[in-house]
Image: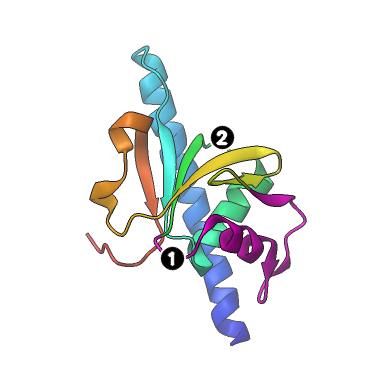
Amino acid sequence: MVSLNVKILVDQKIMLGYLQIIVDAIHNNVNQKGLSVPGNAINGLGQIGKLVLRDIIDTGMDCDLVLLNDPIGNVEQHALLKEFDSVHSRWSTPVAASNGALKLNGQCFRLMHEKTIEALPFAELGVDPLIDCTNMFKN
């Protein structure tokens, strides 16, 4: 079990490095064209999605996170599961549920419970790209 968790952490760090490169490229391209910077969303807040979210918050990554989506559980359950992780221990970042949103380190993030990504309001929120952590969409 330990080697699996280490592999997940290594894969996560590599993925977050690529994610930062992608986010930076999108922001640079948008800024050169004089457009507004798009927001980002995380779909799936299981083990991988939770780790991605933790790293984005903890590292202060320049990633305008505007939407979180997970079809299972309510906001209070997600707040509890983000704060108390049986594998990665308690998260030192303050976590709370607040009016249908997750409040992480003083910032509120909208939490939706859609089962399909097509149902998410990407256009309304200006989301691009989506960070999919469900392992359901392979291509």
Q: Nearer the viewer, residue 121 or 20?
A: 121
**Which residue in the rendered view is the most extreme toward the top?**
34
Residue, disc 2: 62
The image quarter containing residue 33 is top left
Q: Residue 19 at what x, y percent from top left?
A: 46, 47
Q: Residue 125 at what x, y percent from top left?
A: 38, 31
Q: Residues within 10 Å of mark 1 (few under 14, many from 20)?
A: some
Q: Are marks 2 and 1 in contact (CB under 8 Å)?
A: no
Q: Residue 38 at what x, y percent from top left?
A: 40, 29
Colour option used: rainbow
Residue, disc 1: 72
Evaluate whether residue 44 shows in this view: yes
Q: Amino acid at mark 2?
A: Asp
| Above or below for 132 versus 62 | below
Q: Nearer the viewer, residue 9 or 81?
A: 81
The image quarter containing residue 54 is bottom right
Q: First in sequence, mark 2 or 1: give its number.
A: 2
Q: Residue at x 70, y 67 (%)?
A: 84
Label 2 to label 1, Cα distance in Å? Answer: 28 Å
